[in-house]
Amino acid sequence: MMPVCKPGAPCACFKYMRTEQKQRLLIIGGGFGGLSVARYVDKSKWEVVLVDRNNYHSFPPLFYQVASSGLEPSTISFPLRREIRGRHYRGVSFHFGDVRTIDVAAKKVVTDYETLHYDTLVLAAGSTNNFFGIPDLEKYVFTLKSTTEAIRCRNEVLACLERAALCRDDALRRRLLTFVVVGGGPTGVEIAGALGELKRYVLKREYPSIDPGEMRVVLVEGSSRLLGNMSAKSGEDAFKALGSLLVEVQLGKVMKGYADKVLSFADGSTIAADSVIWTAGITGVAIPLEGTDVRPARGGRWAVDASNAVEGVPDVYAIGDISLQTADGYPSGLPQVAPVAMQQARCLARNLSRYADEPMEPFRYCDKGSMATIGRNRAVVDMRGFHLSGRIAWFAWMFVHLMSLLGMRNRTVVFINWIWGYFTFSSGLRLLMRSDRYPLRSYWK
């Protein structure tokens, strides 16, 4: 029962009425897009609930540095509970759990541990690896779409080097020292460059029993050039920079399969390698929707309209990598990069905060440029018609990524690591730490 207000006394029902009038906004995904919606939406209008399978936010552009022992995992991750304590997130609550199903008819989301009801739902779960239907590939390759995958990749690289340092079998030694990166996009170029620096500058010093010439870093790309989402000049510069780091770049190589430690390609060639790092494709995270016939479009992405509403599903929006939004110049959909997710999130937050009689604001993407790094003093930047490469592009890349990290501590630690590594090529992070077996518990997957 609503409380009765006494004359001359403060209104006891005011707070009650505000709470009753709030609707629940449920956001799935604590990445760039999900956090931005939670930050900018009007919390006096919405009860905001953020759900994520991890209790931290990660910075995907630097996963390759974790995989190559350049940074600690904690420096590119930030606790979500600490982030939402900030003044911009007051009124936001965090729920830990992996989403199992969404019933859009009943407006409920089922996670590992609970069932959550919503009035409006935002899908911001991001993307995962796409293996293009190649049989069993997921079981045998290493990937870089999460912090844990980057740690697993780092352990594999270090384990291969340690084993090769002791190996006397020539065939096995060659296989252990062959690292193949599949995919010539920014992530593939960056991890290949980091392994190239390891080969050129670190191997002889830290693994004296291994001749650097024995280590082989191969980057294979199915198209005719690197960095297909950037300018041709950036692709050419990246090709030259990788060559200077002793990385073999093989273009026009379409992968067919990987079995018995041997990669096979459409042209009939093969490469024997223990370590294959897959960066060749992404697809939207699979989230089953019940109570509707609408299914994801190509690439596992949800087709959305100009206001990021999922077509055919009421009160459900999608932003970032998991959304498919076409626009002038992007007939196949906007690029799956962080700036798109953050811009969509801000636009959606404004739309969700508008008055009922105001029209929805259509989203318009502003492309501020693309960049990729290949190693120390080696990077490429395309920015509104301008192309930069070399040292100035590398410093620009460092600044943008440093400022994009959450938390002043993380920025400071990463900056110190980069400065130290710039002058010494020394890292205390080349530690092979494998997790022990967990006690038998059903909730540890």
Image: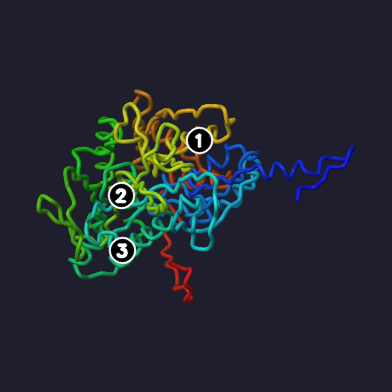
- Outermost residue, right side: 8
Q: Is residue 425 visible?
A: yes
Kindly report which numbered mark, 1 or 2, lies closer to the viewer in this rendering. Answer: 1
The residue that label 2 is drawn on is 279
Residue shown at 39% from the left, 49% from the top: 292
Residue type beneath disc 1: Leu
Q: Earlier in the sequence, mark 1 or mark 2?
A: 2
The residue that label 1 is drawn on is 348
Instruction: Check residue 383 in the rendering and tell me which mark sits there, or answer none.
Output: none
The residue that label 3 is drawn on is 160
Residues marked 1 and 2 touching at CB (< 8 Å): no
Q: Earlier in the sequence, mark 2 or mark 3?
A: 3
Q: Estimate the spatial distance between the alpha carbons at disc 2 and disc 3, rounded to whole Å.
A: 20 Å
Q: Nearer the viewer, residue 21 or 228?
A: 21
Specify the color scheme: rainbow
In the image, 49: left or right of 379?
Answer: right
Above or below, comparing residue 292 to residue 385 in the picture: below
Above or below, comparing residue 139 to residue 198 in the picture: below
In the image, 43: left or right of 418?
Answer: right
Q: Estimate the spatial distance between the alpha carbons at disc 1 and disc 3, rounded to whole Å.
A: 46 Å
